[in-house]
Amino acid sequence: MPKRTDIQSVLVIGSGPIVIGQAAEFDYSGTQACRILRAEGLRVILVNSNPATIMTDPEIADATYVEPITPEFVEKIIAKERPDALLPTLGGQTALNTAISMHEQGVLEKYGVELIGANVEAINKGEDRDLFKEVVEAVNAKIGHGESARSVICHTMDDVIAGVDTLGGYPVVVRPSFTMGGAGSGFAHDEEELRRIAGQGLTLSPTTEVLLEESILGWKEYELELMRDKNDNVVVVCSIENFDPMGVHTGDSITVAPAMTLTDREYQRLRDVGIAIIREVGVDTGGCNIQFAIDPVDGRVIVIEMNPRVSRSSALASKATGFPIAKIAAKLAVGYTLDEIPNDITEKTPASFEPTLDYVVVKAPRFAFEKFPSADSTLTTTMKSVGEAMAIGRNFTEAFQKALRSLEKKGSQFTFVGETGDKTALLEESVRPTDGRINTVMEAIRAGATQEEIFEYTKIDPWFVDQLFLIKEIADELAAAERLDTDLLAEAKRHGFSDHQIAEIRGLREDVVREVRHALGVRPVYKTVDTCAAEFAAKTPYFYSSYDEENEVAKRDKPAVIILGSGPNRIGQGIEFDYSCVHASFALSDAGYETVMVNCNPETVSTDYDTSDRLYFEPLTLEDVLEIVHAESLAGPIAGVVVQLGGQTPLGLAQALKDNGVPVVGTSPEAIHAAEDRGAFGRVLAEAGLPAPKHGTATTFAEAKTIADEIGYPVLVRPSYVLGGRGMEIVYDETRLSSYIEESTEISPSRPVLVDRFLDDAIEIDVDALYDGTELYLGGVMEHIEEAGIHSGDSACALPPITLGGFDIKRLRASTEGIAKGVGVRGLINIQFAMAGDILYVLEANPRASRTVPFTSKATAVPLAKAAARISLGATIAELRAEGLLPREGDGGTLPMDAPISVKEAVMPWSRFRDIHGRGVDTVLGPEMRSTGEVMGIDSVFGTAYAKSQAGAYGPLPTKGRAFISVANRDKRSMIFPARELVAHGFELLATSGTAEVLKRNGINATVVRKQSEGEGPNGEKTIVQLIHEGDVDLIVNTPYGTGGRLDGYDIRTAAVARSVPCLTTVQALAAAVQGIDALNHGDVGVRSLQEHAEHLTAARD
Amino acid sequence: MTTSTRGAKTPAVLVLEDGRIFRGRAYGAVGETFGEAVFSTGMTGYQETLTDPSYHRQVVVMTAPHVGNTGVNDEDPESGQIWVAGYVVRDPARVPSNWRSQRSLDDELVQQGVVGISGVDTRALTRHLRERGAMRVGIFSGEAVAGSIDEASLLAKVQDAPQMKGANLSAEVATKEAYVVPAIGTKKFTVAAVDLGIKGMTPHRMAERGIEVHVLPATATVEDIYAVNPDGVFFSNGPGDPATADHPVSVMQGVLERKTPLFGICFGNQILGRSLGFGTFKLKYGHRGINQPVQDRTTGKVEVTAHNHGFAVDAPLDKVSETPYGRAEVSHVCLNDQVVEGLRLLDQPAFSVQYHPEAAAGPHDAAYLFDRFVTLMEAERA
């Protein structure tokens, strides 16, 4: 029975902003699903607050709502669109929770919307710990396998001590019941520890109850991805084995597909349990992910958990196998069965099979602990990584080493030179799982550790340990060889060694190794990911490199454009760049080119084999890219390589690619240099007559002091050799300047500190523009809500600008054109300006697609990245206007008066991190970017758009209640008006004594509350932190002065994060919030699709 | 603790009968071997594959690159020895890791004298076999390739090796003496199982269901079968060309005459096909793996199944056929290529499948077929 005929329209809920644990993979899944549903002739209605996604492109759904994913807003959309069905399984936990809450509130019933893809009972059974335990018990009763971790509930210390025996001895996990955020949990290895932890736990628990659980730390960890259709056909799409044993979140583990260390009997047992679980839970149509732990000593299987939806692992499994889980889940949801769906890759065989791999896939996580220096870097069962890279090879070592170099992080590749540390110390260090533990393990091996020792300390499976030894032995052979001959080089390459690593071992330059290698004819071939281990011919060119015999890249006639992607997501370089790459691929395909995508990020739309004509799942290093260009040049003509859309990663390769004869199109490497090099850019500015803030470079405190004295405090200081605002700080006085220089250990004459005048109180402005050599197209002008000094990626902004006038836009246009021309841009450029005292300063220029391109494109309904890709290959803006890709007249600087206002808000990962004492990390914004994602609020006026952006990012702004205000002295003046507005809206104000005094003098009443440092009052008066924890505060305004845990503000802000109370840390944000609250309190906030906005804008333009 | 094969870089050569040559390193025993080159796509279960008698005289190419990771134990083999004629892998394990592992696969291959080759581009070889079809192959290492290799003489040796088409091999792999696998728990039925190359898991799956299994040699006669007074008769899997299996066909026809419940697997399916008057033919490169989608045409459900067959039954998919034993239909079909995967008689209790419901290695989706056999025997008794 094919497709259901009773469903004509379906609402798809996306996953919202990118946060740790819920990232770009849901854009990939959601985009696939929307496309499939539309192809089935359904009207697709989409809600997702994240503008940086492909799925929110207006052509992906019929009606795209960039609105907050809250039950309130989704209900408004349902009321307006009246969909027949709601598909909640493709937007992560966010979508699932929203759907469940709308079901519970009766919204779905009220509007007659059917939940498809998963029913409420199944979702609850999968998500609720206790219900899921029952599921596992039922499965065990049926098939005799599978169990949950053993546990006992205890109310006294006697129960606890007796409980240990029931569980089979130490170590045990203690979990106090009903404490906030798992407070008081811990591992007990002996009775003394147990008495201490459980004693504390019993006290902490309001019900004097602790759960004692057997420890499965160090066990082997596996995942299965399953799919089931309405006829109860079930397939296992992929098995995944975690390299890091139990105890590390699977999102933070190095993982391997397929499972490497299971016999068939053990694997089939997992499969039987998995299938029995999906049936017992009742996932009728769609996918699920089940995690298992296996005791390495006797093979006992414990079922850890299941996700009754598409997940990060299912995205990985799709890329690892070529079996598109989300796409097929969408088809199953509308009534197809697995045997009715063809396998895309073979075209001839059905999807009702299980993929088999003739290669190995390794995924490695990418972390951002350097952005959160006070956070504890130990990896635990809470996910902390911000991105991941995947690599494919014909064996584990090849895939593994490729994955490590795909991380594109200094020190992520194994190194085999230099002194090693002490073996015992290294082994002890490797017990604690961290970012980079694998490198410590390799160092321990180099220091003489045995295989048995590595296993004993890390519990990494002996087979994997041996693979590490194999890598190390090859490194030894490379070091010992008299010369690099064909056999040795080929052997090293077959085990994944990069030219860089070989060069390091041999004391040569990387390009010399490459030349030798090429001279000896040692080059990779490209194999196809085909779901079936070559049993059937593959129609889809999805490639990975391997040093093997036979190349599978087919000849082609059309000229190809190679697009370099952005690699693993990280803070500062995320999904926005993938968006631009995907757009380039679409635009260039339309323009008649064969598109070739190169990327190594499994979470993305760009690495969907459907996106481009050819996909190379490869690391983005010079070596790997050069080999792809070589392979493609043998296949047919190459029109060019696009480097300006994937962020800093491909941009950084531009010059070297050109030096190697690769045709880099768009902005030339020399032009990139002109924008990135401080001296060269200074000359561009000088020639265009544009001012930049005063600055200088220093290598000592004395030099820095001289510069600072000359240009005046505050100054912006930063190391000269880092990107993304890393280590950047605003310094207000000489004392801090001195300590900053002292703390910055790596200052040297070749690595000076940059000291810039900090433009206090300036308005920061971002501009995205296109330039073709003669004409400028101003894409959009964004006015930051926070003042200059807060990284643009962390700042909220509005488009069109809310306080700039026509004259300002004119100046911005002229400056942008001057820079674009001076630098020599052919494509996109992003410039940051600061307006202070009526002077427009240029802060920096990036001659590439910026983070804001998708936001600008959606806010103005113009596909900037597509246009940039076309300009790169020679089209002019005039031609693109004539073609209709760009508006016939006008641009982002001449938006009509009634154009909608779009507000972008950044989303911060504070709640993910704890310091080593278990306390939260400070939430203050600064010049270093730390947000993981963003949302967009769009409406006809600023206040509503801002309120929507807040609702999308953090939850709705309060419209009444108690607001706590505590601001730094420099902010007191600007706080008065917004505070008065809050009172007018009926808020009760709370303030610490200093702020209260200022308010009172301005005629605003505020209740004085005690500071944290003052402690509880003599009559039990609570401190502000206690009040926040008790839920007595609805809005917090707290602007910092300096950073650090010693300040009162730190406790306030971390309490706000813990309790999810909106917390504004700048007065500008307060002013915007007041406008938002005003909008919420006046009249109904409506919803409008991007298509409706675009229609309105286009009509106004014509 | 290592039993490294990487250290010993003994060269080896694989020569296909059409002249294509792959170079690699010796794996397992050193020497030379010949057989029919086939590829298996299972990612787990190499022990079961190696010991499956159906692989007799075949050189098996593993498409999964890593082989030997979980070592070798004494619980998982499907028969008393390794049957494959040769073994082709890409990356053999240096260190086995599994709580049940007793020794390394490398050692086991050496001990049983199985010549193998490692380090070859197994994907290229698989694609070659897919495009050109299964063909004869030779693996040469040690003495055979010492010094300069005379490719022409190696190729000549390969071309002299016997063909699989027309090979009658069951007797070579089947038991010589009858033996009994007792029922687990209460005995409910007696089954006579004709061993044409039976796998250990098959009688075990029956025993689990209260069946006492009398495994009889391939040469067993109708009289031998009825001597055990069976409630049902079973015909196993096995190697070789079904077109040569005249003896098993006549024995099965004897069983069909008596309308005793009958179940066949793999070779047994082909025997049933021939007994009913259908032909058999050699597939281009066969089905060998544990991920094959088969549809049960009676329920419409799809099961993921283990396959190992180079031949198939030629029966019409679109209609019920008239046979000497009444009406017959194709009960199961492979969704990848519409190959007949099961037959069923409509007027008497007999059925068979071309694939492996005992699933060792492989998924357990088709285990219900043993229940179906039990149901047939129950119905007959009632």
Image (cartoon, coloured by chain):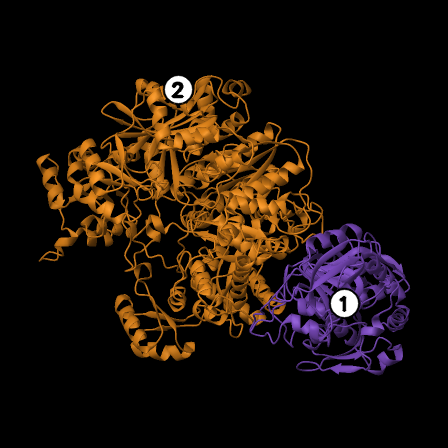
Chain colours: A orange, B purple
Q: Are marks 2 and 1 on the same chain?
A: no
Q: How many marks?
A: 2
Quarter where residue A233 is shown: bottom right
Q: Which residue is mark 1?
A: B143
Quarter where residue B148 is shown: bottom right
Residue A62, image x, y percentages: 52, 33
Image height of A48 relative to A693, above or below: below
Q: Amino acid at mark 2?
A: Thr
Image height of A885 relative to B9, above or below: above
Work out whether residue A105 or residue A198 is closer to the camera in this orientation and state it: A198
User: Does the CB distance between marks 2 and 1 fall below 8 Å?
Assistant: no
In this image, B221 relative to A924: left or right?
Answer: right
Work out whether residue A187 or residue A204 is closer to the camera in this orientation and state it: A187
Q: Amino acid at mark 1?
A: Glu
Disc 2 or disc 1, which is closer to the eye?
1
Categorize mark 1 by other alpha carbons within 10 Å: few (<14), some (14-19), many (20+): few
Residue A360, image x, y percentages: 59, 56
In this image, A664 relative to A853: left or right?
Answer: right
Residue A666, image x, y percentages: 50, 28
Q: Which mark is residue A894?
A: 2
Chain containing mark 2: A
Quarter where residue A80 is shown: top left
Work out whether residue A289 or residue A844 is closer to the camera in this orientation and state it: A844
Q: Which mark is residue A977?
A: none
Separation of disc 2 and disc 1 at Cα? 83 Å
Residue A964, image x, y percentages: 19, 44
Q: Secondary structure at mark 2?
A: loop
Q: Secondary structure at mark 1?
A: helix
Work out whether residue A745 or residue A264 is closer to the camera in this orientation and state it: A745
Q: Is residue B372 visible?
A: no
Q: Is residue A115 visible?
A: yes
Chain containing mark 1: B
